[in-house]
Image (cartoon, grey):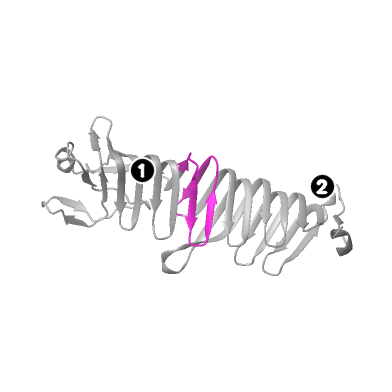
Amino acid sequence: MIAPHMIASRLHAASFAITLVGLMAWYGYAAAETAEEPGGSPVTSGAIAIDADKAIEWRRAERIVIARGNAKASRGDTQVQADVLTAHYRNRPDGTTEVWRIDGDGGVRITSPSQTATGERGTYDLDTDTLTLTGGKDLAVTTSTSRITADRQIDYLVASKTLVAHGNAVAVDGERTVYGDVVTIHLADAPKGQSQFQSLDAERNVRFVTAQDDIRADHGTYDADSGIAKVNGSVKVVRGSNVLTGCRGEINVKTGISKLLACDEARDGGTRVQGVILPQSLRKN
């Protein structure tokens, strides 16, 4: 249930604060317990508070609440900021209401103990438990160990801790950088409530850069625990002036060992592995 008395009484104030009651949390569940607001009104313990500098508008017919001007929505230790925040709500069978989507427009910034996400626009769909960020020069998600950027869109599937970056995607994890048209990153829990890079899958125009190697391919995967990256399709491995080409490759970033494998005869025609290794004397010329 949305607390209408809190909205209506503050529509013309210089600053605003409302509570969206009965709201499913950012991570897709609704709290069952109830508590009392300072004024004595019942609210759920999982409520989300919204405040803004300019105005909060309640459109009953459209079932939306719009907060304008440095708007902020908070639940627990998660906060969403934007120039404008719009909460969409609907009726439930039991007669209460629930928010099913929240949109942010203009300088969206979402912070929690485990990651920070930024973009020009953002949508959180509570039904699918998915956060979508688009636009802006700083379209990115940053965790305790990695940073993921893209030109077009970043989707965060909250329940599975999966990030999908679309359009010139770049994932930086320590000394390793992965590029691709689409990069899918799987995160894992880390100490102190943080998230850390676990594995990734990159598609099209893939480039995997380490301290030693610059690898190009059509497709690539990387596992942080093993330190092994696997690439396939038009593979090219460059280390200094040395170049190796083939169909499949395996790189262990922990040992620095790179393996290039010949193409499968039935599938790829059996092309041999090729390479150019320059002597040290030639490299200096």
Foreground: disc 2 or disc 1 = 1
Q: Which residue is mark 1?
A: 82
For the point 50% across and 42% down, which residue is it? 137
The amino acid marked with disc number 1 is Ala
Residue pictured at 68% horizontal, 65% vertical: 253
Residue 47 seen in this snapshot: yes
Magenta span contains residue 34:
no
Q: Position of residue 48 (x, y in %)?
A: 27, 50
- As helix, strand or loop, the secondary structure at mark 1 comes to strand
Q: Nearer the viewer, residue 144 or 95?
A: 144
Outermost residue toward the top in this view: 61
Q: Earlier in the sequence, mark 2 or mark 1?
A: 1
Q: Which mark is residue 268?
A: 2
Answer whether residue 134 is magenta in the image.
Answer: yes
Where residue 168 appears, as percent x and y from the top left, is 60, 43
Pick the residue in front: 80 or 1. Answer: 80
Quadrant location of the N terminus in the rendered image: top left
Span colored in magenta: 133-159
What percent of the width, then of the height, locates residue 154?
A: 50, 45
